[in-house]
Image (spheres, rainbow, N blue to C red):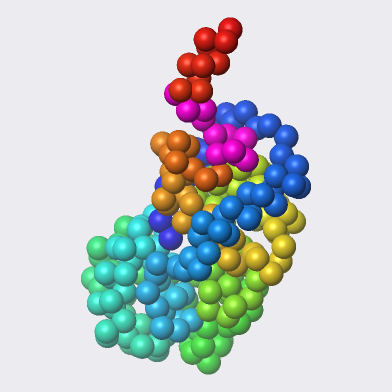
Amino acid sequence: MDWALPFAIFAEQEVDFMRVTKKIRDEQLAILEETYRGAKPELIFRNPFELLIAVILSAQCTDKRVNVTTKRLFAKVKSPEDIVAMGLPTLENEIRDCGLFRNKAKNILAACQMLCTEFGGEVPDDFEALQRLPGVGRKTANVVMSVAFHHPAIAVDTHVFRIANRLQLATGSTPLAVEQGLMKNIPKEKWSDAHHWLIWHGRKICKARKPACDICPLAPVCPSAEPLAGQESSKGAEK
C-alpha cells in the first residue's frame, strides 16, 4: 500500500477537532460506503502467498510499482520454496526497483524459510502466527487476514491513519490506537470494507498535503474540512 506521510509527521500536525457524535460517524460511514462501494486492493495477487509478498514489498512503495515488480517475480516463483531456492542475491535483483529492496529481500527470504520449516510452505490463517514472520507487522497481518482469508480486520496504513484522525472516526497518535478506535466505532461486519473505503478516499480526495475539501462528499460531516473560499469571504462580509 502506498505511504503518504510517516505516522509521526501526521501525529504532530495540529488539527482543531470538533466533537463528533455517533450519529455523525454513522453518516460518515454511509457516505464512504456509497462513494467507494466495491473498492478492492490495487495489488495484483492470486493466492495468500503472493499477497503476503506483495504487501511486504508495498512498504514505502506504490501499489503500481509493486505490481510491476511482482509480475516479474511471480513469473519465476510460485511458492516459499521457490524463494528459498532463489537465494538472497537473485531475490534482491528481482525486487531492485522497489524501495528498500535489500531489507525487503532479507525479510521475504527469512519469512519464506519460516513458512517452509514451520508452516508446511503455507501462509498461516492466524493473526499471531503471521506476525511471527519477518517483515510482517500488524498492518500486513491484518491485510492478509482480511483480503486473503476473509476475516474481519482493519489494517491501518498512513491513509487510514490520516483519514480516521481527520474525520475523528477514530483518533490516536499511533496506528494501534487508531485501529482499536476504528474497531470500536465501525460495525465488525464492515471492518474489511471500511479499510478499503478509507484507503481510496485518502488516495483520491483527502490527500496528505493538499486535501480536496472543495469536492469531498464528506466535507459536511468532517471536523477537519476547510471552508470554501466563497464561504470564507461571506463570513468576513457578515462581520
Q: Is residue 9 left or right of residue 175?
A: left
**Furthest residue in direction bottom, as rendered:** 120
Q: Is residue 165 above or below residue 62?
A: above
Q: Which residue appears at 63% of the width and 55% of the height?
A: 30
Asked if residue 165 shows in the view, the reply is no
Q: Is residue 62 above or below residue 218?
A: below
Instruction: Verify whether residue 222 appears in magenta.
Output: yes
Query: Is the magenta region chiefly helix, strand or loop?
Result: loop
Magenta region, residue range: 219-229
Q: Position of residue 231 (x, y in %)?
A: 51, 23
Q: Position of residue 52 (x, y in %)?
A: 46, 75
Asked if residue 187 shows in the view, the reply is yes
Q: Position of residue 154 (x, y in %)?
A: 61, 62
Q: Is residue 126 left or right of residue 229?
A: right
Q: Between residues 56 and 114, which one lies in front from this camera angle? A: 56
Q: Is residue 130 above or below residue 197?
A: below
Q: Between residues 135 and 17, which one lies in front from this camera angle? A: 17
